[in-house]
Amino acid sequence: MRIVNDCDVVGGRVTRVRMPRRWLVRIQVMEYLRAFLLGRTGWSRIGGLLIISGAFGLFRREVLVEVGGLDPDSIGEDAELVTRLHRYLRECRRAYRIVFVSEPVSWTEAPSSTAVLARQRRRWSRGLAELLWKHRSMIANPRYGRIGVLTLPYFVLFELLAPVVNLGGVALVPIALWAGAINVDFALALLLASYGYAVLVGFVALAVEEYAFRRYSSWRDLGVAAAASIAENFGYRQFNAWWGLQGIFAALRRTKQVWG
């Protein structure tokens, strides 16, 4: 999946790829590069892929019918389907592969306003929470191989609970600093290290994209993409965490699901 905002499109075909004009969308471009080009390629390589995007997935029809198809009650139906396929095929002790292929690209329009982006991220967070609860018996269960002992615990700790940790830190660190309970030098060093690592991962994703596909034709686009990786850490991540927390609360309250 790649973001088409502000690219040149002629007759339904992307003729020139460029970075979007809005910073909100530019940051999402870097998110997609990390999530798809690095993240899903890595999970696929170790046999632990949990999500095949609903916008661009290909399945064997007979297996899809066996597991009952998409779940109409799930708001994260793409990830839920893949998780259910892992579960079913492992319980049946059948050999199978679920893989991510990076070469084909489906171009999608990303949210260009905070209101639409907020609805999207709340939906993603809620979908993940409901998926993990539905398949909670698989978590840390060796019966399900890498999915059970590695992928699902990772998604609990570093995806589902990330908004809680992020916003918890934002709230607690200033209080701890005021109370003198934190070593300021160590806290600053840890902050720089964590932000530096986040920026580094973005740069690596951009380097892999440029090395493998060379879709950006100008150095300006590459410079803007690198700047977006840095800008993401100042406000964007915190808002994302807040929207993610709202999605978790919506799942806990079991309010009516709205696509938005």
Image: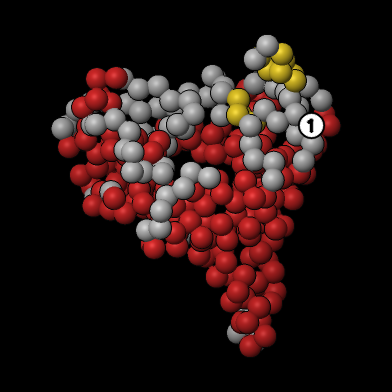
Query: What residue occupies the far right of the structure in this picture?
Result: 220
Q: Secondary structure at mark 1?
A: helix
Q: Name the amino acid, label 1.
A: Asp
Residue found farthest to the bottom: 179
Closer to the camera in the image, 227 or 160 = 160
Where residue 132 appears, x then y in whole percent?
34, 51
Q: Which residue is mark 1?
A: 221
Q: Position of residue 64 (x, y in %)?
A: 28, 26
Residue visible at 44% across and 59% down in the picture = 250
In the shown orientation, is residue 120 left or right of residue 126? right
Which residue does the image show at 44% across and 52% down from the upper left?
126
Q: Vertically, is 65 above or below 162? A: above
Q: Nearer the viewer, residue 201 or 100?
A: 100
Q: Is residue 196 visible?
A: no
Left or right placement of residue 219 versus residue 144 in this view: right
Figure check: 130 above or below 63: below
Q: Position of residue 122 (x, y in %)?
A: 52, 52
Residue 78 sits in quarter: top left
Frontmost residue, 236 versus 233: 236
Q: Position of residue 127 (x, y in %)?
A: 42, 48
Where residue 8 sits, quadrant-wise, is top right
